[in-house]
Image (cartoon, helix red, strand yellow):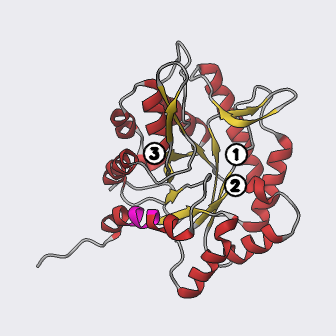
Amino acid sequence: MLPSLFRDDLPPCAGIGLKPAHYADVLADVERGTPPAWVEVHPQNYFGAGGPPHRWLGAIAAHLPISFHSVGLSLGTVSGVDREELAALAALCARYEPAMVSDHLSWSNGPDDKFPDLLPVPYSHAALDHFVAEVTRVQDRLGRRILIENPSRYLAYRRDDWSEVDFLHELCRRSGCGLLLDVNNICVSAFNLDLDPLPWIDAIDPTLVGEVHVAGHAVKADGMGGRIAIDDHGSPVDGACWTLLERFLCRSGAKPVLVEWDSDVPPYAVLMAEVEQAKALLRPLSMPEMVHG
């Protein structure tokens, strides 16, 4: 098992993406002593000063580690990170002291617009220089290391200077950030770009990974006679995603694994059944080695 730079930040157990529909269920599980090991939220949903969202989150944060998975910094935007988003994120971090903070290898802001999507960046030398500078800016403002998530891709740029894995590794080396490994995104990108996901998952450096995501995705007709995978987080985790996760964990050892379910949110029991599958993969990796006489 390889050592991790992030061993003490989140427990190397299974967590859930926390949704309002499940606030009461999580607190009930806290009372029963059977809650998820940790929860993750999109901090943008808590940028308001108060109200019910903060009352619920505060009650849960009193018992469970929290991870902030930001979707609004727009690190890849040419003009740089969204300063208002960063200030709000810094204030929320000071309020809740989350165990982990992450954002995406993407951009979502134009000069006059905010787009409701995480748009791809080219893997060029210029894009890498830009990302290193912006991730460093965020880390300096927050006073902490953050994680950057690998994207789900629907198309690829021509003449990239780096492979995706090498781009991510170099970003970590130069900025000091870590990686949020989204296994479902690998499945989506591999389907859409006709790539083999095994070399990708085998190439990633486990010591840089501070959190892992699994989720479901949809495959739909693309209107041109083919099919496209959509990263919608609206269904149970795909079997191929579980297989890739197990392959990675066999190399890395136990990691914090999050089950994401963001659309068509199911009953709490259905979500926790997915968590049990993640726990089944993590449990043998967390057991102490037996001593043989």
Tag 3: residue type?
Val
Which secondary structure dominates the residues rendered in magenta?
helix
Give the answer, above or below, for where 265 lies relative to 62.
above
Dot 1: few (<14), some (14–19), or many (≥20) neighbours within 10 Å?
Answer: many
**Residue occupying the point 54% across, 77% down:** 35
Dot 3: few (<14), some (14–19), or many (≥20) neighbours within 10 Å?
Answer: many
Q: In the rendered picture of this protein, how many numbered marks are placed on residues?
A: 3
**Residue occupying the point 40% across, 25% down:** 194
Of 196 and 255, nearer the camera is: 196
**Residue occupying the point 11% across, 79% down:** 293
Cα distance between the residues tagged 3 and 1: 18 Å
Tag 1: residue type?
Val
Residue that carries the numbered disc 2 in the rendered image: 42
**Residue occupying the point 50% across, 22% down:** 162
Residue that carries the numbered disc 3 in the rendered image: 183
| Label ID, residue 272 | none
Image quadrant where residue 42 sits? bottom right
Tag 2: residue type?
His
Is residue 75 one of those drawn in magenta? no
Q: Position of residue 141 (x, y in %)?
A: 77, 49
Of 254 and 110, nearer the camera is: 110
Q: Position of residue 147 (x, y in %)?
A: 59, 48
Left or right: 167 in relation to 120: left
Q: Mark 2 touching mark 1, by CB under 8 A? A: yes
Is residue 277 one of those drawn in magenta? yes
Of 173 and 272, nearer the camera is: 272
Cα distance between the residues tagged 2 and 1: 7 Å
Query: Disc 1 on helix, strand or loop?
Result: loop
Disc 3 or 2, which lies upstream in sequence?
2
Query: Disc 3 on helix, strand or loop?
Result: helix
Specify start and end residues of the magenta stretch as a single range. 274-279
